[in-house]
Every structure is written in structure tokens, then in C-alpha cells.
Image: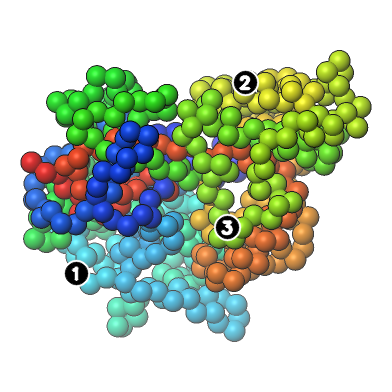
Amino acid sequence: MLKKVRILMAVFLVAAFMLSGCINDEPKEKEKEQSNGSSQYREKESVAPIVGGKLRFGVLSLPEWNPLKWEEATPQYSPAERLVYRGLFTYSEKGEWVGDLIEQYSLETKENGTKILHLTLKENQKWQDGTPITFEDVRFTLQTYLDPFFYGAWKQNLSYISGTSSYRSGKKESISGITQSEDGEIQLILDNPTSSFFHALVAPILPAHLLKGKKPEEINALITEGEIIGSGPFKFESKNEKEIRLTRGFPKEEGGPYLDEISFVLYDGDVTSLDKANGYHVLAVPPQESPTLPKNYLYTDVTQNLYYYLGFNYKDEVTSKPEVRKAIHMGIDRAAIVNELLFGHGAGLGTIPAAVEMPDDSIFHAPAADVENARNIMGQLGYSAEKPLTITLHYQADQPVVAKLADILSEQLQRMNIRLLKKPLNGEEYYAYLFSGQPVQAFIHAWPAAKDSGLWWKLYGSYHDVKDLGLNILHYENKEADLILKELYAAIPDGTANEKEQAFLKIMNQDLPVLPLFAPKQTYWIEEGVHGFAMNGDGWLLHAENWWVEK
């Protein structure tokens, strides 16, 4: 039960406070721009690329190497995994769902409601041993993930493929809804799919010619040991407690990378004595006050694809009161939180997935802190410095950022006559308590920005209520918004710009049970000779085949 609970809470959770970032959409031009005495990284195309060389990426925590997400709750690539394995689809710099191994696609809806996803593989796509990528690889991969004995997170949401139940029960030897036409087009026949299904198609495609006949557990063991090739620009070379090494997957003349090697190297975050001799070409720098940028380095701040929020239980006698939540929203000083917690390396309310201006009366519109009015609201409810309102706050104490955030919130809320009774919990204990049926008033959590509008219906829709498990957090009341979002949730990700705007204008006006606080930023120091640095909101190194280092 606990594992299922963790999946529910963590299905969109980005837990890493390390490599995750959001691509800077500035024009690509590498030059020194003075900003508080530092130099901002931009790409300049005037220098001829060099083939060869090794890039060392200093990280605060090594990227995970578990490509099949075995016994994990969240199907999320790490930066290292994404350089080795590719999926049918991927995410662009702006977080858009786009083809990766797929050249083009379309979705057909039959009169009986069945949907067919038509896919065309890109031509001349190969595995790193030169074997062509074919329909058989796609079919083998999807059937592996849907095998009843596959225990990786990539299986989530793929079961909409027609014939999955018969396959999993052993009645059929293959999934009938995975077919190929005579002209080579791949068809996935789907029964009432949701946008979550389409997002699951970023899962790594596996080489059938190397893995056929092996059980899922054997396949996972081989891939975890780095013994199975992928179709990405790099291949797994080695891993230890301090480093992950990836080497060239293809020759440059066959579309491979400029670099011979990328290595992720663990370091302690101490950048006080850093210089070029340390050998790091890119560094993830922990938040700190006025760090001195070393000579020959540039920097960039990238916004992580998640935001921290304060969640409320709508079934609680205290936190169900709109006046209490309004006072908290009004009195919280988000700028002070970002400054104290991250030395200013944070972005307001983060990358809330809306391309529209937040309405002034939305909880996602963050005004400057107004402690006096917040205190007045609490006074009208009968609370004062002598008689404060007590709210119990649960949070994960083993996450330093969250523990510090709890302390800061406690100090800020005290100014409006609200006393936080802090209840720190560790790891699994935190999730177990939230869903144990025990009384929970408020808690701290983090969600990434949804990759499409439809996922908001899954997160916050009126039909989704977990009060029977002791907590009611994913809930708002707006049937019209529900209808719009539900339709988007049952379609290919993103829908139209107009649909998204309609949906979000309605959602942003809701009194949601989540109070967004901030999105963290990660600072990267980049040696001047590095070209091509780019990341997306999931921390993937983008277009890594085009990265190169001056000698």
C-alpha cells in the first residue's frame, strides 16, 4: 500500500535539487555580459567546432543510473541516462512533447471511440553497434514494459494499448494493439488513452536483437550494469561512487558527438579555490552568498521545473477556512524566502504552466507581502499575539531545503499571529503519515510544472479526492474547467493554445488547496572554452552531440 501511495504522491515529483534546469531562451551568442560583476553564458557560433576532447561536469549528486526505473515510482530520466537511451518521443527546450526516434505522427479516432496513433520512424536510425532501429524494437520494448513481471516505472500509463490485458494474463503471446502496415508505418491501437499515455512514450526503446528471450529482471540487470547499448550520442562506460563516464556512441561522421567523453564527477560544492586547473568544464554550484566567479568561467542560472508549495487539508476545521488561507497567502514574503533559503537563486512562483497573465485574485498571483493586512484578517477571526492560531505542519526533515523552508515559514507566519507546530518526518515515514488517516492540516511538498494542460485535471480536478485516505489535497470546484481539462487530458499533450488559455484562466481563479511559494534556480559555472551548453526543465543535457570544448 505504501508503495502505491508514494506513486500517487510522486507521479510528477522531481526530487532532485541538483541537475534540473530550464533552458534559457536568449539568442545563442557567447559573450561576456556584466551582471553584478559576473559574466553570463551565451553561445557564439563564430568559432569552428573541434572533434574530440573530454568534458568533466562537476555535480553535487551523481545522476542516477537506473534506466528502466526498476522498483521506482517516477518514470523520469536522469541526465546520464538520457544521453545513452532515446525514446519514441522527447521534450524540447520549452518542454514540448516532440518526436525523437519518430519523424511524424498523427492520431486517428474511429467511430467506436478507439484511437490509433500512427507513427513513422526516422530513417537510418541505428543502435550503437550499427544495427538499424526497427518496428521490432518498438514492439519488443512496449511488451517488455507491459510484462507482468516488469517492475520498472516506465510501465505506468502504457496499458491503454489494446490487447494489454490478454497479454498480461497469458492468453496471448503478444499485444494485438501494436502493429505495422505494409508501408512500414507503426500503429498503436488505444483504448481511451490519456495524455499520460503519450508522455510515457518518452521511455527508452530497447534493442530487441540483443535482449529477445530474456526475462525483464535479466534485461534490467544487464542495462543497470551498462552492458546494453542505446541509440543516444553516448554509451555507458563506467560508474563508481564518485564518477559516471560516458563515451562516444557513434563516430562523428555517422552523426555522433564532437566530444569523445562526458563524465559526471561528484564534488563537495566547495568552489572557493576553483580555477581552470581543477579540470571541471561545467559545475553545478550550490546556492551561496556572492560567490566569486573564477577566471575563465562564465555562468548561467537555470530555473528548475518544479515549485515548492504549502498544501492544505480542505477537510480540516482550521485550514478549510478561506480567510486563514488568504491571510497566509497575503502575509508570506516569497522574496525573503528565496533570499534566505537560496541567496536569491529562486524564481517567484516558478514555471506554473500557463502562457497567460495570472489574475490578481488568483492564489498564483503573488503580491508583495502585506503582513499588516494579514494580521488584521487573523484579528477578525479572533487571533492575536496572545492567542495565536496553531497549525500543524508536516514536512520531510531529511531534505535540507524543506527543513530550512519550514523554519522560515514558521518565522514569517508568527508575524501574523499564526504558530506553526512543526512535525518533521523522514523519507517513507512522511508519505505513510500523509495517507494514514491521521489528521494533517498543512504540509510542504514540491510538484514540477505540468508538461501539458490535461495533467492539471489529474492533479487538481473535482473528481479526484483522496479524503478516504485521510487527506484531501487535489481538489477544486469548477465543473466547466473540469470539462475543458478532462478533454485535454484525453488527447495528445498540449492541445491548442486557445484551449490551454481557457483552461488556465479558469483554474487560476480557483481557491486551490496549494499555495505556491517559489521555484529554485540552479547556478552553473561554465568554462569559457565550452560550446553548446543547454538544458531543459527535466535536467536533460540538450543537443549534447553538438557540445565541444576548445583545446
Q: Which numbered disc covers residue 407?
A: 2
Query: Mark 3 against mark 1, which lies toward the viewer?
Result: 3
For disc 3, the neighbor class at 10 Å (few under 14, some 14 to 19, many from 20) is some
Image-quadrant location for residue 102 = bottom left
Q: In the rendered image of this protein, does residue 223 appear above or below residue 145?
A: above
Report the front residue among 396 and 115: 396
Left of 263 or right of it: where is 425?
right
Q: Secondary structure at mark 1?
A: loop
Report the front residue among 26 and 536: 26
Q: Secondary structure at mark 2?
A: helix
* Amino acid type shown at disc 3: Ala
Identified at 34% across, 48% down, the residue is: 535
Cβ–Cβ under 8 Å for marks 3 and 1: no
Q: Secondary structure at mark 3?
A: loop
For disc 2, the neighbor class at 10 Å (few under 14, some 14 to 19, many from 20) is few
Identified at 26% across, 67% down, the residue is: 134
Residue 68 in picture, x, y percent from top left: 37, 45
* Amino acid type shown at disc 2: Asp
**Marked residue nearer the N-terminal end (3 or 2):** 3
**Marked residue nearer the N-terminal end (3 or 1):** 1
Q: Which quarter shows the N terminus?
A: top right
Identified at 36% across, 39% down, the residue is: 35
Q: Which residue is mark 1?
A: 124
Identified at 31% across, 26% down, the residue is: 292
User: How far separated are the C-alphas under marks 1 and 2?
Assistant: 56 Å
Residue 209 in picture, x, y percent from top left: 22, 58
Q: Which residue is mark 3?
A: 354
User: How far separated are the C-alphas under marks 3 and 1?
Assistant: 37 Å
Cβ–Cβ under 8 Å for marks 3 and 2: no
Report the front residue among 511 and 185: 511
Query: Mark 1 against mark 2, which lies toward the viewer?
Result: 2
* Amino acid type shown at disc 1: Asn
